[in-house]
């Protein structure tokens, strides 16, 4: 994480002093230590102390030379903000409506795989944190816990992310979607930017593999097709998106749209929303930064559906820039995994709280009182 303000290791007394495995991530001692973490970069430093090298490499790394990871951050950093002063900002409203859901703030937890890598309770613990923070959590197809268990842990809405819609899986997917709906799932995201995983060099060097004792209820490892030892998710196409559209009335989003042509096709396929994403730089290196692409997508979409964005969001000012350039909301990936590793549910909720507070401050300091007031003029 390159956002400024990282705590040096010497400023993490309680966390660093603990033996890696001696204090459970959500013990009171650890919660106290969490108060030392004041920005999202601090959580990465703290989490790293508590994670195996393999888990850290899996989460932090990206594809190939990690140029896209770097660009995701640099593009946010290069945008300057244009303030307005002497606006009465005593009351700030960060809420937004999305698919009939009222979100208190425009920040969601992106789908990320294998939460058991950093916490024994896995996605159930993440959901507890999301519940405390009042954040919507998008559960990954590579979840290590069942959706019903995750749903019991939070009163906030859950969405589910799907990978493989290949024709021979339609029956399975139809049953799963029906089951998810019955369990209260509020939206589906189909990830379309990862038909193969990408050149994960750091992951390979760290010899990452899914631990044998992990249950992955929505991913059958025995049946998985592999390419260079990594799963292949995609022999599916626009036809399968149209098929999924015809089987469910749940809001449907495509995650991983970067090309305006694809945005157009997606809307014509009947999807309800788009997520501009380069998979956190984990699939195809040298894809552009998501915040740089967002304006083109917004222009092509022309308000037909809401557009969300993820990739490199680490500061409240990043959330503001994304909203200014037309996003309805942002998602964060790695930061909340670091929160989970550093402090379990409390770590997850603290990460969201820090980002939300920073966003509110950025609104006050630019004289914007509601999301409707955050338009392009706030970017210099
Ligand atoms: C460890 C890890 C696992 C991920 N697993 C998935 C996944 O299972 N499905 C998916 O659609 N995206 C996955 N992503 C991508 C995220 O949903 C998201 O696009 C990305 O993390 C956003 O960038 P950020 O980490 O810079 O916030 C994963 C990302 C990370 C870091």
Image (cartoon, rainbow, N blue to C red):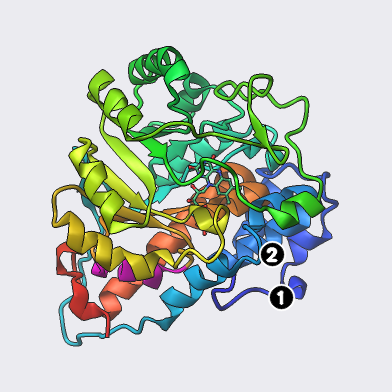
Could you tell me if residue 38 is visible in this image?
no
Residues at badges 2 and 1 in contact (C-beta under 8 Å)?
yes
Q: Nearer the viewer, residue 377 or 177?
A: 177
Using the image, tell me which numbered label, if any, was put on residue 45: 2
Q: Which mark is residue 8?
A: 1
Q: Secondary structure at mark 1?
A: loop
**Main secondary structure type of the part rendered in magenta:** helix
Q: Nearer the viewer, residue 171 or 32?
A: 171
Question: In the depicted view, which residue is nearer to us: 351 or 81?
Answer: 81
Does the magenta-highlighted stretch encompass residue 342?
no
Q: Is residue 168 above or below residue 160?
A: above
Mark 2 lies on a secondary structure that is helix
Is 228 above or below relative to 347? above
Instruction: Report the front residue among 237 and 202.
Output: 237
Residue 360 placement (x, y as % from top left): 32, 67
Left or right position of 227 against 242: right
Range of residues picked out in magenta? 315-325
Total marks drawn? 2
- Expressed as whole percent of the image width and height from the top left, the position of residue 123 reads 56, 34
x 69%, y 50%: residue: 58
Where is residue 330 drawn, in percent x and y?
36, 56
């Amino acid at each position: 994480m390159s956002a400024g303000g990282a705590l040096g290791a010497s400023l993490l007394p309680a966390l660093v002093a603990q033996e890696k495995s001696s204090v459970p991530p959500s013990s009171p001692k650890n919660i106290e230590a969490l108060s030392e973490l004041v920005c999202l970069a601090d959580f990465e430093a703290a989490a790293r102390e508590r994670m195996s090298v393999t888990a850290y490499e899996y989460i932090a790394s990206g594809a190939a030379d990690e140029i896209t990871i770097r660009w995701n951050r640099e593009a946010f950093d290069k945008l300057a903000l244009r303030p307005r002063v002497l606006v009465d900002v005593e009351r700030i409203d960060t809420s937004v409506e999305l698919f009939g859901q009222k979100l208190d703030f425009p920040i969601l937890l992106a789908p990320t795989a294998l939460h058991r890598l950093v916490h024994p309770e896995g996605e159930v613990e993440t959901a507890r944190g999301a519940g405390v923070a009042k954040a919507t959590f998008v559960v990954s197809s590579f979840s290590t816990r069942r959706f019903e268990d995750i749903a019991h842990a939070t009163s906030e809405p859950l969405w589910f992310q799907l990978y493989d819609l290949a024709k021979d899986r339609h029956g399975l997917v139809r049953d799963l979607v029906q089951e998810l709906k019955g369990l209260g799932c509020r939206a589906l995201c189909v990830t379309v930017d990862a038909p193969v995983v990408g050149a994960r060099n750091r992951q390979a060097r760290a010899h990452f593999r899914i631990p044998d004792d992990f249950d992955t209820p929505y991913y059958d490892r025995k049946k998985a097709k592999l390419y260079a030892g990594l799963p292949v998710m995609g022999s599916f196409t626009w036809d399968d998106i149209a098929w999924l559209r015809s089987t469910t009335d749940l809001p449907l989003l495509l995650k991983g749209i970067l090309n305006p042509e694809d945005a157009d096709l997606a809307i014509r396929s009947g999807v309800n929303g788009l997520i501009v994403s380069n998979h956190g730089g984990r699939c195809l290196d040298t894809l552009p930064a998501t915040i740089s692409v967002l304006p083109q997508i917004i222009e092509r979409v022309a308000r037909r559906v809401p557009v969300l964005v993820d990739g490199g969001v680490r500061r409240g000012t990043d959330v503001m820039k994304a909203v200014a350039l037309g996003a309805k909301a942002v998602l964060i990936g790695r930061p909340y995994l670091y929160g989970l590793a550093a402090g379990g549910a409390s770590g997850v909720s603290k990460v969201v709280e820090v980002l939300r507070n920073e966003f509110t401050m950025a609104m006050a300091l630019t004289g914007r009182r509601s999301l409707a007031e955050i338009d392009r003029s706030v970017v210099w």
